[in-house]
Amino acid sequence: MAGPLRPSNLTTSRKVNGMAADNYRTAGPLLSELGQELAAFVGGDPNGIFFYVEIGEGWVRPSLFRAEGDMVRFYPPDDPILSDILFDIWYTEPDPTKRWSVMEYVVEDGKFRAEYKFPDEVDVTKPDIERREAALRAHFGDRKVVYPPIEGMTEWKPSPTT
């Protein structure tokens, strides 16, 4: 696997990708750790990762995608370590009214970029698959998304006609 992920476009302004700079100093190492965990999840090479997360008190809805040639593969991120890291990042903001609701985490050329949306921008208390799909399309365009088969399901095949 490549070395540690580095943040891209890091600035010294008061805000970094929507997060207060003081919180970013705390969250930055956690965001790098998140990237390492995601890289392991997809087999080692993190380039092409798009990680979409909606979060609230006591729950998290992560979705992990990775560009693979002409397509995008979905990886079911059911790892409790990911949830722990996400909550650690979320709780770096001590004021619950200022915590992010959505994070889009992208890895390109060994660098990560994390962008946030806050409760005044999006209401994640109501599940909405279309929010995730819109973010996915905004990032990958019309590339085909491949989802793994659902365990226990079989493909329906029509019976032959005689």
Image (cartoon, rainbow, N blue to C red):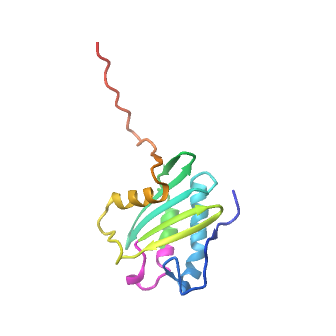
Vertical relation: 12 (above or below) 159: below
Kindly identify the residue that appears in the image at 50 percent across and 48 percent down.
73
Bounds of the magenta segment: 88-101
Residue shown at the point (39%, 56%) measured from the top left: 133
Residue 117 sits above or below residue 129 on the image: below
Q: Is residue 84 above or below residue 74?
A: below
Among all residues in the image, which is located at the extreme top? 162
Q: Name which quarter of the figure residue 1 lies in.
A: bottom right
Q: Nearer the viewer, residue 108 or 119?
A: 108
The image quarter containing residue 122 is bottom left
Q: Residue at x 49, y 55 (%)?
A: 140
Task: State yes or no: residue 158 in magenta.
Answer: no
- Pick the front one: 88 or 64: 64
Residue 25 point in image, percent of width and height: 59, 82
150 left or right, relative to 75: left
Q: Quadrant of the C terminus?
A: top left
**Residue 37 in picture, x, y percent from top left:** 58, 61
Residue 98, x across and y down, in percent:
41, 82
